[in-house]
Image: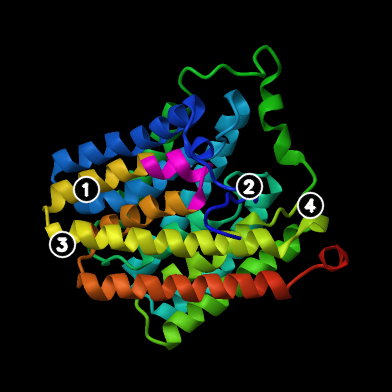
Amino acid sequence: MSPLRNEDGRRTTLSSLRPDTADWDHALRVALALLVPGVLLLLWGRPELLVYAEFGAFAGMYGRFERGRPRIVHQVQAGGLLIAGEAVGIALAFTRSPSWLLVLVAVVFVTVTSVLADAVRLRPAGPFFYLFALGATAMLPSDLAPPGVALAICAATVAFAVIVGNIGRPDPLRGRPWWDGIARLARRPAPSVGIHAVRYALAVGIAGTAGVLIGVDHANWAMAAAAVPLAVIDSSKPSEVHLGPVLNRALHRTIGTMIGLALTAALLAIDPGPTAVALVAIVLLLPTELFMARHYAIAIGFFTPLVLLMTELADPSEPARMLLYRGVDTLIGVVVGVAVALLVRSRAERRA
C-alpha cells in the first residue's frame, strides 16, 4: 500500500514510471483535444470558459488500449455521460440550487452512471469523471455563460476528442459488419453492477453531506474523492474484491492531491494572469494522462492543479482558503470511500 507501489501492487521503479511510445501517443491525443478548443477560447477572449471544454476533452481518455470501432464506441459513450454531467451541473448552477440539492442530484446521477459505465465496461472504470463534471460546473457562477453556449463548448470538445483520438488508428474490425463495433452494448451486465452502484451512492451521499454540514465549500470535491477508492473494484469479478487496492488508491489520491495543491499554490503565488494560467492548465493535461496508467499519485499531482486552475479562472476565490478546503474535501472523501468499500459487500464478495 505504499505510494512507491503501483496500483497492481508492484514496486515502482524508474523503468516502470518511464512512459513508452503508446503512452505518449495516447497522452498527446488527449492533450490536443483540449489544446485546440482552449486556444480558440483564448482567441475569443474567454479563458474562463475553459472549464466547460476541460471535461469534454476527458472523453479522449477512454478506450486507451483499444482501436477502431471499439475505441470510438467507448469514447462516444463516455462523452455522452460527460455531456450529461455538465448538463445537470449547468442546470443546477443556472437555477442557483442549494448545496443539499447538489448532493441529492449527485447521488442519483452517480448511481445511474455507475450502472451504465459498468454495463458497457468503460475504462477508466467508474463514474468519477462524470460526477466531477457535474459537481464542478454546478458550483460555477450562474452568469458565467448562457447554458446553451456552455453545453455547446463541452459537446464540441467531446466530438473533437473522439476525432483526434481515432485519426490514424487502424480498425481491427475492418471488413466486418458495422454492428460488430457496438455488439458489446447488448452484453449481459456484470454480476455486481448493482451493489457497486449502491457503494457509489452511499459514498457520494455521505461525503457530500459531511462537506455541507461542516461548511466546507465545494462539497463536490469530497463527493468526487469518495468515488476514487471504489474505482479499483471490478464489478465483473465479485470474488476478487480486496481491501489492499482500495487503500492503495486512496493513498495515491491523497498524496497526489497534496502534491498538486502545493504546485497550485506555487503557480497562483506567481500570479501570471488569466492567459498564462489557462495555458498552464491546458499543458498539465499531457503529464496527467501520460502517467495515469503508470502511477496514479503522480498523475493526480498534475490533475489537481489542472482542475483548480480551470475553476479558479471561472470563479476566482481566496487561494489559501480554496487550497485548504480542497485538502479537507479530499481527506473526507477518501475516508468515506474506503469505509464504504470495507462495509458494503455482496454475498459473493463476503465469501471471497
Residue sitting nearer the eye, 240 or 274: 240
Q: Position of residue 78 (x, y in %)?
A: 54, 44
- Kindly state the secondary structure of the residue where label 1 is placed: helix
Q: Amino acid at mark 4?
A: Lys
Mark 4 and mark 1: Cα distance apart in space: 41 Å
Mark 2, secondary structure of its residue: loop
Which stretch appears magenta? 287-296
Q: Nearer the viewer, residue 152 or 346?
A: 346
How many angstroms separate mark 2 from mark 3 (CA)? Answer: 37 Å
Three-letter code for the amino acid on which mark 2 is drawn: Arg
Q: Which mark lies nearer to you, 2 or 3?
A: 2
The residue singled out by tag 4 in the image is: 237
Residue 300 appears in which quarter of the rendering?
bottom left
> In the visual, does 262 lie left or right of 333?
left
Separation (CA) of disc 4 from disc 3: 46 Å
Q: Is residue 169 above or below residue 100?
A: above
Q: Residue at x 40, y 49 (%)?
A: 55
Which disc is residue 10 wearing? 2
The numbered disc on residue 269 is: 3
Task: Identify which residue is drawn at 40% across, 76% down.
Answer: 328
Is-magenta flag for residue 208? no
The mark that comes first in sequence, 2 or 3, is 2
Q: Which mark is residue 278?
A: 1
Furthest residue to the bottom?
213
